Image (tube, grey):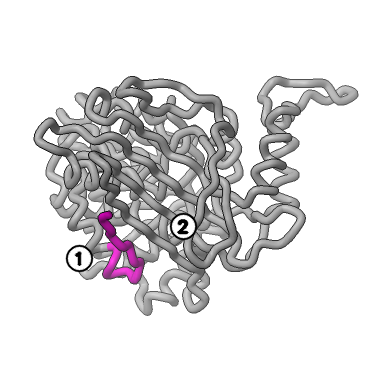
Amino acid sequence: MKLLVIGAGMMGSAAAYDMARAGDVESVTLADADGKLAESAAARVNKLNGNKKVRAVRLDAANYKAAGKLMRGHAAVLSAVPYFFNVGLAKAAIEAKCHFADLGGNNTVVRKTYAMSKQAAKRGVALAPDCGLSPGMASILAGELFRRMAGNNGKVDALKLYVGGLPEDPQPPFFYHLVFSVNGLINEFVEPAKVLRNGKITEIEPLTEAEDFQMGGFDPMVAFHTSGGTSTMPETFKGRVGECFEKTLRYPSHFAMIRSLYDLGYFSSEKMKLGKTEVTPREVTSQIFLNKLTSDAPDVCIMRIEAHTDGHVAAFNMVDHYDEKAKMTAMMRTTAWPASIVVLMMARGTIKKRGGIMQETDVPANDFLNEMSKRGIRIDYALR
């Protein structure tokens, strides 16, 4: 089979690397508006894999007509570009009869993508938004915990998701560095978080309801609401789960800094004049974050997914580290590889459903866990 990845950045290149390792994958096309970036990423991935399966092409993700033309002849495509391209790319994929997945990043965009489910099903196409770490892997595992823990009444008291990408060796003053798109990061801080409270869908202000979080071997952390992490779970589990939320993990001083920036309006998209120039605070903050928080230092990814019911707690736990040999961050491994697995499942027919694919209900969790284990990512299960 032939697969396509649009976006040759950290996540796109890691996904292409993973896809090209599969024996039944004939080739992977890695496309980016920056042709030189695509070429260098393809060359690096081919060298790591010891083959020449990945080929680079230049593509402007905003040119949906060209994207659709490129999709033809590919079994499935992964969008690894910023979320605001995804609706147009999904439309192009439906027209090209190419299964589509993306890394998500925005609730509104994801729902617009799912609104095309019937159209996609008629064309024999699967649409799988939100295929990264959280939402994505975290949603798949939360769905599996629900199935394991739901009693005869088909209900669970709570699903609690805690996820964070952090520096392996956090340094002052920020105790954080960028591990994925700055656009996606800031978006988590500005849109409301969708949760379940008493079985009903509720919207919560981002950067609120902070709670202490502990994971063995790490300094104390803070968990707090951010946007997008629950994806479709509130709708899926409405009336069947009392409480459902996803919280981001950070070190306490970093959380305090981000909350202060939020209160001061640094993430606002309202235009303001600086002399004769019009800018938004968000644009300025994005550039500052890129300048100050970019680092190639090793990272670590932490995840705990919990299901609570009748006094019992079932949990999946994961701690993944930077891969020195492959020069791949933990965030690349735990975001791009789950997306790659879902793309491969759609292309192979492991996921047979067509139309909208919900991570928590439509991705076979045991197969997914086996695939992650094959890739050296350990996810432990515990029941107490």
Query: In the depicted view, which residue is nearer to us: 327 or 55?
Result: 327
Query: In the depicted view, which residue is nearer to us: 214 or 99?
Result: 214
Q: Which mark is residue 24?
A: 1
Name the residue located 25 percent from the left edge and 63 percent from the top edge: 371
**Quarter of the image that includes the C terminus:** bottom left
Q: Amino acid at mark 1?
A: Asp
Q: Amino acid at mark 2?
A: Ile
**Quarter of the image that includes the N terminus:** bottom left
Marks 1 and 2: which is nearer the front? Answer: 2
Please give the range of residues in magenta. Answer: 372-384
Query: In the depicted view, which residue is nearer to us: 222 or 69?
Result: 222
Residue 126 falls in which quadrant of the image?
top left
Q: Is residue 56 visible?
A: yes
The crowding category of the residue bearing disc 1, from other C-alpha atoms within 10 Å (few below 14, some 14 to 19, many at least 20), is few
Residue 107 pos. (x, y %)? 43, 29
**Structural distance between the alpha carbons of marks 1 and 2:** 31 Å
Residue 140 lies in the magenta-colored region: no
Q: Which mark is residue 1?
A: none
Relative to 131, is 287 on the left or the right?
right
Name the residue located 34 percent from the left edge and 29 percent from the top edge: 113
Q: Which residue is mark 2?
A: 302
Residue 332 pos. (x, y %)? 47, 59
